[in-house]
Image (cartoon, rainbow, N blue to C red):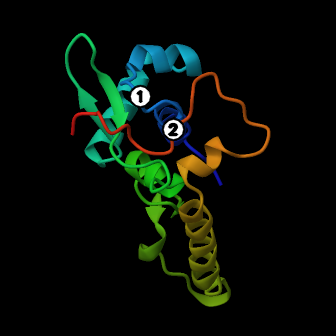
């Protein structure tokens, strides 16, 4: 399995935003903290915003917030927001593939693999990743959006 740079960056952005929900965070700040190219990060944040995972605030005090509680955003949400389908074979969606002869058993195998992958990514939330053993935080972590945030 290959995890794209976009998916990796998307998860890292969501972790950054979940770590401190008391104020918006700029792309520039996240790019520096996570060592991600700023222009690429802006595209990733745009995908996350269109997927409803982050929201933006304009102005001098602007930046990005989580659009939902970190307990409700899964790793699957992040990956699908930036990459689409979880599993593709030779660049094609798994559902569109068919095999013949001795390779027929690949169809249910790929379906089972996709289902297991989906379950694992869906069971892991951004909040869970933040609280995993051994992880330390530079900033205070909040599990829900601050009540004073604009919506």
Residue 77 image point, x, y percent: 44, 54
Residue bearing mark 1: 22
Look at the picture and state if 134 lies above or below 120.
Answer: above
Residue bearing mark 2: 142
Is 63 positioned to the left or the right of 88 in the image? left
Q: Are marks 2 and 1 in contact (CB under 8 Å)?
A: yes
User: Where is residue 118, by image quadrant?
Assistant: bottom right
**Which residue sits at x=45%, y=53%?**
73
Residue 131 image point, x, y percent: 67, 44
Q: Residues within 10 Å of mark 1 (few under 14, many from 20)?
A: some
User: Label 2 to label 1, Cα distance in Å?
Assistant: 8 Å
Name the residue at the right extreme.
134
Nearer-N-terminus badge (2/1):
1
**Which residue sits at x=38%, y=41%?**
145
Residue 37 appearing in the image: no
Q: Residues within 10 Å of mark 2 (few under 14, many from 20)?
A: some
Secondary structure, mark 1, is loop
Name the residue at the top extreme.
60
Secondary structure, mark 2, is loop
User: Where is residue 21, by image quadrant?
Assistant: top left
Q: Which mark is residue 84?
A: none
Is 4 positioned to the left or the right of 148 in the image? right
**Which residue sits at x=58%, y=64%?**
123
Look at the picture and state if 95 lies above or below 127.
Answer: below
Residue 101 image point, x, y percent: 62, 89
Question: Camera-side residue: 133 or 47?
Answer: 133
Residue 37 image point, x, y percent: 49, 17
Task: Say which quadrant the N terminus sits in.
Answer: bottom right
Is 66 positioned to the left or the right of 106 in the image? left
**Which residue sits at x=55%, y=54%?**
125
User: Where is residue 141, by image quadrant?
Assistant: top right
């Amino acid at each position: 399995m290959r995890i794209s740079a976009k998916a990796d960056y998307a998860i890292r952005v969501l972790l950054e935003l979940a770590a401190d929900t008391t104020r918006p965070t700029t792309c520039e700040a996240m790019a520096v903290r996570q060592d991600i190219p700023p222009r690429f990060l802006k595209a990733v944040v745009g995908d996350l915003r269109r997927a409803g995972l982050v929201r933006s605030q304009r102005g001098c005090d602007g930046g990005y917030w989580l659009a939902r509680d970190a307990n409700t955003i899964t790793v699957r949400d992040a990956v699908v927001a930036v990459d689409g389908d979880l599993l593709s074979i030779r660049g094609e969606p798994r559902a569109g593939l068919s095999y013949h002869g001795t390779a027929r058993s690949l169809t249910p195998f790929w379906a089972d693999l996709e289902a297991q992958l989906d379950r694992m990514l869906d069971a892991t939330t951004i909040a869970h990743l933040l609280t995993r053993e051994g992880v330390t935080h530079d900033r205070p972590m909040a599990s829900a959006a601050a009540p004073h945030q604009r919506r």
